[in-house]
Image (spheres, rainbow, N blue to C red):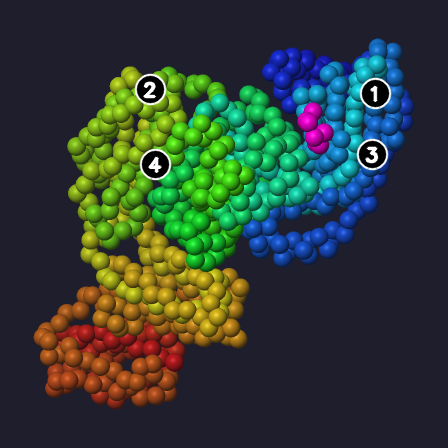
């Protein structure tokens, strides 16, 4: 009885929803199929339903191919294999004419072992009152009702994946209209990689460094995220990402930007709002907000873009957002990426640094390069996803790169500014479609079809231009504001605190309409050595009291190094420099410093790179990594890493790296806190250096050596490991193993300069 009551409640809910959807010409009516109601429905039938069995493809072979393809971000992520079939209303399934004047057609499709099934139609046309349902055995994944609103001029159609290995099709039409309907299925996509049943850490698709878009770092991106869409491409067997774009007319015309390498298929599936409902624990999302079909408007392989116009605009129930963009050739100072890595739920990544102009894996100016991600990364399946600048405007779409969890380096985005009008012909440009009246607009903010919940709501989006660690306290910093309310804002006053001390207020005036964004310069502040905490909040607005104060405050901490020690890191790669990376962090973990290597190129014979590094008086660790696990000393070359101080003395030297990772600890206090008596006692040299472990070290002083009592040797952590009476020829004890050390001379109260000693 409870089951019966529950079903009638569902009937009531979906009947109400259907009446609303019908008025708005939605793509699905929101109903359940007649078979769901069993004997209580006037559509019940007893005719046996034929089942079409699909042979399982060679999944092991597909997965072997995936092992190779998954390393290439410019190949869309594959989840299924398209299998050719020929099913239609005339020759397959079973028709039943019912007493109520309707007829019902049913067909089952089964593919043993499949994790999902989806369909491509070579012919699709439904009469005005026809309803097509597609669902799985348990009715926990129902697509329907599909109606005549989905008819297209080319008669092509496709549906999103349905969970499980068994799919049911159910078409209900007035009996007199049976002949008007055309449903011809030409492909069944066998889903062999699961996009539904995911592991707790990452749904088993994307890496565990990726962050759900609903996590705290995404708080200021909850409107922007609604523009990002998951796209099925290549006969709907592969995933890419894309974004819904605003246009200068701001009329909600549904343009979608994605990557050219994702393919030019016009019967693609576009899925909105596929995301976890929580930050943590991670949960699977739903694929119900989908649309099928689009018209290709423009594409170009140089900047790797494709622009589609969806056949139907997303219905209001999808609650989409049309993202803003910038066609100016200006590097983003702070970037964000929203994407579907590995076909997973929506993720968010951040780059706190300026992007660099680049070619695609080489010289050129048609791409933006993200050198490294501070939060998250991108993966296969992220292809085509938008790169947003500090003003939350799209400046490119993902072409490819080497970034992955454990290696946050190097991603390339085709420039929006190049795609705008650099390449000749409207079919190679964004401009004719996004600015059809040729107004000359190059910057456009987003468009939200739904009204705001608040009349007055100014959002402080983020700081940018002030690194989390810097040796330059004169860096010009900014903060970004956005009008999230319905009412225009013409002036605002902001209060700012530095380390708890109130500074002079910041005044702004202008005319900020809904969804518009503007950047405001931070004044020069009296930063101190070490960690500085900046707090910014809204004091007053011209439009009145801010009605949503959750987004009214920004807080940022930055380590300002005014007492810098300049170092230089030299690195020579092997033939495969793209595999090599390094990172420097403080050992105490007490500040915000993290130096990371840029992306290196693959160069035959290797290449030498020099990096100036600004540190301070403390101890640090340098981690050297090779993503392939064979280091840079082997059959592909002879690389090295050399870290020296401003005097050229060696701090870290490595030329025997053959694994995946090495960690070096070093301290700079031994280099800078030397008590010197006079210049005469600072003329110290040691040789040979590097020194064989069983060799003899010669100590040379340019002046009289009288007065030095002892020779001291420290390890990289600053620990004293050897004290010997002074001599000009020293044999090392056996406890001094291969490595890098510090050597000093000492008398009763003074120490000499420090020399770096490398023991082979």
Dot 3: element: strand
Q: Nearer the viewer, mark 2 or mark 1?
A: 1
Above or below residue 63? Residue 106 is above
Horizontally, residue 405 falls left or right of residue 61, namely left
Numbered mark located on residue 462 in the image: 4
Q: Earlier in the sequence, mark 2 or mark 1?
A: 1
Dot 1: element: helix
Numbered mark located on residue 179 in the image: 1
Quadrant containing the C terminus is bottom left
Region of the chain picked out in magenta, as a range: 151-157
How many neighbours does mark 1 have within 10 angstroms: few (below 14), some (14-19), or many (20 or more)?
Answer: few
Q: Are marks 3 and 4 in contact (CB under 8 Å)?
A: no
Q: Are marks 2 and 4 in contact (CB under 8 Å)?
A: no
Question: Residue 345 location in percent, x, y?
Answer: 56, 38
Q: Earlier in the sequence, mark 2 or mark 4?
A: 4
Horizontally, residue 301 falls left or right of residue 714, namely right
Dot 2: element: loop
- Pointer 2: what residue? 488
Q: Is residue 296 visible?
A: yes
Q: Are marks 4 and 1 in contact (CB under 8 Å)?
A: no
Horizontally, residue 614 falls left or right of residue 484, namely left
Q: Earlier in the sequence, mark 3 or mark 4?
A: 3
Numbered mark located on residue 87 in the image: 3
Q: Is residue 318 magenta?
A: no
Q: Residue furthest right?
A: 47
Distance Cα–Cα, label 4 vs label 1:
59 Å
Q: Earlier in the sequence, mark 3 or mark 2?
A: 3
């Amino acid at each position: 009885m409870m089951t019966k009551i529950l079903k009638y409640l569902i009937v009531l809910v979906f009947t109400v929803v259907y009446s609303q959807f019908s008025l708005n010409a939605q793509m699905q009516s929101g109903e359940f199929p007649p078979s769901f109601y069993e004997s209580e429905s006037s559509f019940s039938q007893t005719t046996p339903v034929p089942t079409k069995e699909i042979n399982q493809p060679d999944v092991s072979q597909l997965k072997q191919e995936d092992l190779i393809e998954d390393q290439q971000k410019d190949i869309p992520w594959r989840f299924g294999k398209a299998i050719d079939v020929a099913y239609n209303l005339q020759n397959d399934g079973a028709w039943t004419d019912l007493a109520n004047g309707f007829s019902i057609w049913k067909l089952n499709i089964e593919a043993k072992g499949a994790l999902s099934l989806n369909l491509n139609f070579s012919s699709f046309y439904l009469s005005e009152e026809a309803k097509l349902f597609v669902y799985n055995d348990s009715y926990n994944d129902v697509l329907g009702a599909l109606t005549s609103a989905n008819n297209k001029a080319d008669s092509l159609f496709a549906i999103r994946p349905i969970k499980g290995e068994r799919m049911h099709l159910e078409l209900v039409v007035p009996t007199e209209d049976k002949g008007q309907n055309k449903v011809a299925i030409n492909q069944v996509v066998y889903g062999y990689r699961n996009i539904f049943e995911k592991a707790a850490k990452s749904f088993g698709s994307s890496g565990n460094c990726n962050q759900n878009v609903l996590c705290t770092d995404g708080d200021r991106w909850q409107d922007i995220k609604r523009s990002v869409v998951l796209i099925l491409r290549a006969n709907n067997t592969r995933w890419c990402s894309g974004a819904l774009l605003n246009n200068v007319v701001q009329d909600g015309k549904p343009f979608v930007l994605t990557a050219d390498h994702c393919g030019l298929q016009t019967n693609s599936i576009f899925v909105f709002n596929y995301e976890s409902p929580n930050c943590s624990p991670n949960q699977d999302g739903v694929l119900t907000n989908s649309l099928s079909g689009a018209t290709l408007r423009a594409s170009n392989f140089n900047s790797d873009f494709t622009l589609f116009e969806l056949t139907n605009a997303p219905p209001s129930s999808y609650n989409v957002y049309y993202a803003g963009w910038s066609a100016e050739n200006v590097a983003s100072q702070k970037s964000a990426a929203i994407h579907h890595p590995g076909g997973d739920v929506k993720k968010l990544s951040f780059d706190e640094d300026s992007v660099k102009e680049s070619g695609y894996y080489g010289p050129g100016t048609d791409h933006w390069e993200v050198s490294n991600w501070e939060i998250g990364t991108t993966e296969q399946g992220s292809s085509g996803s938008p790169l947003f600048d500090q003003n939350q405007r799209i400046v490119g779409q993902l072409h490819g790169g080497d970034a992955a969890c454990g290696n946050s380096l190097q991603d390339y985005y085709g420039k929006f500014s190049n795609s705008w009008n650099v390449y000749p012909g409207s079919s190679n440009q964004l401009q004719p479609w996004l600015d059809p009246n040729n107004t000359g607009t190059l910057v456009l903010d987003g468009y939200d079809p739904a009204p705001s919940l608040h009349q007055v709501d100014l959002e402080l989006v983020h700081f940018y231009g002030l690194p989390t660690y810097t040796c330059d306290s004169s860096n010009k910093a900014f903060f970004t504001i956005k009008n999230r309310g319905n009412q225009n804002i013409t002036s605002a006053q902001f209060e700012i605190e530095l380390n708890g001390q109130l500074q002079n207020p910041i005044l702004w005036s202008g005319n900020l309409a809904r969804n518009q964004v503007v950047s405001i310069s931070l004044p020069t502040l009296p930063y101190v050595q070490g960690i500085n905490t900046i707090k910014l909040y809204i004091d007053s607005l011209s439009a009145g009291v801010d009605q949503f104060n959750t987004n009214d405050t920004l807080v940022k901490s930055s380590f300002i190094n005014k007492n810098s020690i300049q170092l230089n890191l030299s690195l020579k790669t092997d033939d495969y420099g793209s595999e090599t990376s390094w990172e420097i962090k403080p050992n105490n973990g007490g500040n915000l410093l993290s130096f990371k290597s840029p992306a290196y190129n693959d160069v035959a014979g290797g290449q030498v790179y020099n990096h100036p590094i600004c540190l301070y008086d403390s101890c640090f660790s340098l981690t050297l990594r090779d993503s392939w696990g064979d280091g840079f000393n082997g059959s592909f070359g002879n690389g090295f890493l050399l870290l020296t101080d401003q005097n050229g003395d060696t701090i870290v030297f490595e030329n025997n790296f053959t694994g995946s990772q090495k960690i070096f600890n070093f301290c700079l206090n031994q280099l800078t806190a030397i008590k010197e008596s006079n210049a005469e006692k600072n003329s110290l040299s040691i040789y040979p250096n590097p020194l064989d472990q069983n060799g003899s070290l010669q100590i040379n002083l340019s002046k009289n050596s009288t007065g030095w009592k002892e020779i001291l040797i420290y390890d990289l952590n600053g620990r004293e490991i050897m004290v010997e009476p002074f001599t000009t020829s020293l044999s090392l004890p056996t406890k001094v193993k291969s490595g890098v050390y510090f050597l000093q001379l000492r008398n009763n109260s003074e120490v000499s300069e420090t020399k770096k000693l490398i023991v082979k």
